Amino acid sequence: NSRYPANGAVRPKAMWPVIGLRHPGDRVTMSAKCMSSHGIDAFTVMKNSLAVDEILCSYEREYKPQIPVQPKLTPSTGLSLPHWFVEESLQEYTRWKSGKWLRTATRGSGQYKMSSYGLDVDLDTSPLACAAACASLGLPVALLCGDRVDVKRSSGRILELQEEAVVLGAYQGRLFYRLVSQKSEGGSLMEGGGRAWFWDESEAVEGGLQLIGEGRGRSVVLPKLNRFNPVCGGLKVVYASGAVVRSDLEIFDGSENLGNIPLGTIIPAEDIIERRLNSCGVARYLINHETLGRGWISGRIRGGKEEPIVEVIPFDNDDDDDDGDGNTQPEHYLTPEKSANEWYKHYVAAGGGTESSSPISESFDIESLDEFQALLSAGKIHGLNDMDSDSLIASVYGKLVDVLPHFSDGVECSFIDCASVLASASPKDEVKDFSSSIDANVHEVASESLVHVIDRLPSTKALMARIAM
């Protein structure tokens, strides 16, 4: 299947760095490229344990004789689930069916799926959310869910062999991806590299991420934020030793020293191409210099007292809407959302974002909690008790997740794909072939798993409700 090579064979590892500070004034840069979890307090753990116990007791009642407290009352039959659990199950069904959210583990997640609080995420796969995350990276175009990208930078270093990644979606303003090809020797796909992770702006510098093919964003230009295109009157070199111009955003041995701009030099605003943070959090400016050419200079010294190297000259704003020659000033984009909204207008005009829900998808709409509860009651396989029926359904769903196409590290699969396979396996279901792109082997897996109960299956809609539970 499409999972990373050592799935199930090598446990992901979390390395905790140990940093030694030897001299007074030594500093450590805390990168923003991390995820953290404060864990779960004891009260919540106990509350969750009691909630799980309440659900499991609902199944246990089937096997224990019910002794009525009052003689006139007859014991209830069938599975009686807590009301709060049914409501949460309906919310889960709606989330899954919408197709907008993608649930996945990340490189920070623990060994067991969906068990790391704050580190397992629900990614927003909508074009607008992805565009906003791309705007925060300073990308010229939007990378949407499913786009494939050549990755040439990682964590402040240029890769000797480029990697290939697929875009998953956005979470907390970050664009998440998953590596699908890693050619480097001893690649980390076996120890978590195949899990979801996100890019920062230093990796999205020009040439760092290259879209493979046309992409799903229809080549619509994404407006850059002001922090990447600083609105100022220019830069003045204020450091005594001048400003070193390097060929790369990062400051390492492979970054060629192009020369030095002396103290007091003023770099005009039209020669400032971009402002961007590198992997160490140092603000760098991409400039055009008349003698040294195109290169990067730092805003401050890295380390020590972090003395400023250049000073931003305030923009001379005369409160007019033009630049004096009758030309309108370019619009400012202060937030990723504003940039994404502007991009989305042109994206829709180019024919994107017009996908409407299909009649097949609409046939699985659930209008009320009562309807969902009725589907749960009807979703049991005839001839089996609730526990055996749900165990079989869960087992079949797990097998489908293993063989169906997915981006989410095997946590879940597409609602429509799952419904299509289950409908094709049921001889009584009138709706067939939702998705013709599903491999025949997937249908074979479903048929083999359900062959002994094939004539006792409930409707596909009821099965999907039961799976969401």
Image (spheres, grey):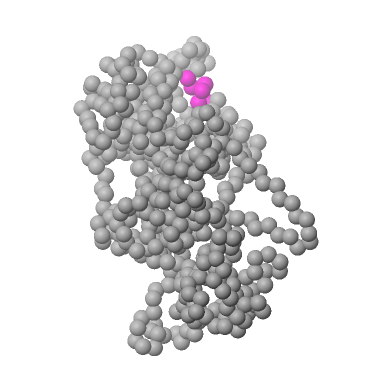
Residue at 26% from the left image edge and 48% from the top image edge: 356
Q: Picture coordinates of residue 347 (x, y %)?
A: 30, 59
> For the magenta stretch, what is the residue range?
54-59
- Front-most of residues 115 and 362: 115
Res 124 visible: no
Res 26 visible: yes
- Front-most of residues 380 and 326: 326
Residue 264 vertical placement versus 41 (above, below): below
Q: Picture coordinates of residue 450 (x, y %)?
A: 33, 19
Residue ranking furthest to the top? 65
Quadrant housing the N terminus: top left
Residue ranking furthest to the left? 430
Residue at 40% from the left image edge and 55% from the top image edge: 210
| Residue 301 sits inside the magenta stretch | no
Residue at 38% from the left image edge and 57% from the top image edge: 142
Q: Viewed as shown, does residue 5 lie left or right of 35? A: left
- Front-most of residues 99 and 241: 241
